[in-house]
Image (cartoon, helix red, strand yellow):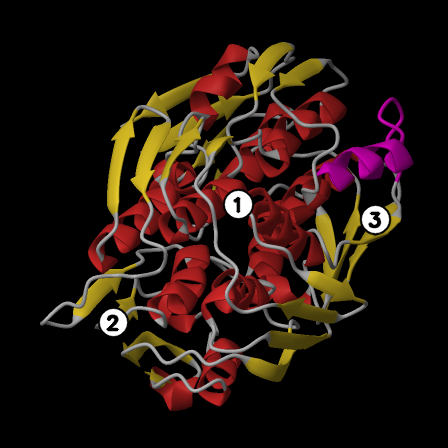
Amino acid sequence: MKVVIKPSKVSGTIVAPPSKSYTHRAIILAVLSAGNSLIKNALISNDTKATIEACKLLGAKIKRSGNNIEIEGTCGDFPKKKSPVTIDCHESGTTIRLMTGVATISSSKVVLTGDKRLMKRPIGELVRTLKSLGVNISASGNNQFSPVTIKGGSFKGGKINISGKMSSQFISALLLIAPFAKKDTVMIVEDLKSKPYVDITLDMMKTFGVEVEIDGNIYKVKAGQKYKAQKYTVEGDYSSASYFFAAAAITNSKITVKNLNPNSVQGDKYFLEVLKQMNTKNLHGIDVNLENYPDIVPSVAIVAAKASGETRINNIKHLRTKESDRIQSVVSQLSKMRIKVKTTDDSMIISGGNLKGALIDTFNDHRIAMSMAIAGLAAKGETIINNAEVVNKSYPDFWKDLEKVGAKIKIIN
């Protein structure tokens, strides 16, 4: 599918889709709980479907009606399967990392795999740590990449050191299963990137009845705590909302986004602070550290492309192992749109200018598709987004919502 975008003055109101991060965690915690949970307003996207299917394959009973999900809790007691369980996580990095943790408390042999790009995304630090905690686990490429194979559960807990430099999801995976360990788990986390995603995990664990003691970079989870079933409504997603805030900023218009929690622990609400620093009426370049906010980097880059002067986006090396090398993806596509971008190993320096329409490659990366679509609203001439269906990974209604606020788009199937 291709989408053709013409310069557009946009305005109006959209409802932010449910949070992908919260939906993943709500599904997993409901599966691990005692009792039956109802997850309302869940995000139903390719990634969250992968997590639902993964939990079902381990033996969980899950029913979905629209955006509501009914889940019978297992208390972590999954039925033992005679044959190995193969879980295809497709393109979802969140699914494969969080479910690697969950699979360790199953007594079945579990193999977690996915598509070609997912096989190149690192998982070695999580595998290493689980090995040190007594889990019989192995992975390909000298234990650095999936497929991951887990032979029966033996997660014992204890004191561990783990790096969060490559992905915060490693820490989240361990936190979620820590209550099932034989003894207390104490995690000393070093060089944590994308910390707000760990905060989401902690927020959800508390909602489902498990406390985590935090002292600086030390996280302690007492063994034997039980997750309790909940009726839970998923809040709106700030990452997805960022595209519409960016659209308003670069077209000097007004868009209202509903269904956002102003008190959310989602880190990506920081995008609003970035816009404030850039001054939305007369955009100007800034220096900004997005170490903890990787998912809004493409949105910030698009606003920077229309701002006067230079914008430097710092501490983003970990974006190179996302769905694409997201630094290179943004740079290459903005360059097509006649914007000057320089890079270092962990930063982008964007010189604002006049965007020109171009044929956009998405690199099968949903955030590249959506951010470049927004750039097309303020570009001279037509912008064509190839592989536009990739937005189904996190925001299936993106194109509908873009039309809703007045964007001139044409969908070519």
First reached walking from the N terminus: tag 3 or tag 2: 2
**Gap between marks 3 and 2 measured at Cα:** 46 Å
Question: Image point 31% across, 23% down: which residue?
Answer: 66
Q: State the residue position of label 3.
A: 311
How far apart in space, not on screen, are marks 1 and 2 (Cα)? 26 Å
> Is residue 30 visible to the viewer in this orientation of the structure?
yes
The label shown at residue 336 is none
Say left or right for 146 vs 238.
left
Q: Earlier in the sequence, mark 3 or mark 1?
A: 1
Q: Nearer the viewer, mark 1 or mark 2?
A: 1
Callout 2 crowding tier (Cα within 10 Å): few <14, some 14–19, many ≥20: many
Q: Tell me: residue 358, above or below residue 295.
A: above
3 vs 2, front mark: 2
**Residue 372 against residue 74 in the figure, above or below:** above
Q: Which residues are magenta?
A: 269-284
Per the image, is 333 magenta? Answer: no
Query: Can residue 356 be seen in this snapshot?
Result: no
**Residue farthest to the front?**
224
- What percent of the width, then of the height, locates residue 13? 61, 11
Amino acid under label 2?
Val
Residue 146 pos. (x, y %): 35, 74
How crowded is the residue under tag 3: few (<14 C-alpha within 10 Å), some, or many (20+)? many
Residue tagged 1: 208
Q: Which residue is mark 2?
A: 110
Rendered location of residue 259, percent (x, y): 60, 21
Amino acid tagged 3: Thr
The reply, left or right, for residue 160 in relation to residue 119 is: right
State the image quarter where residue 273 is shown.
top right
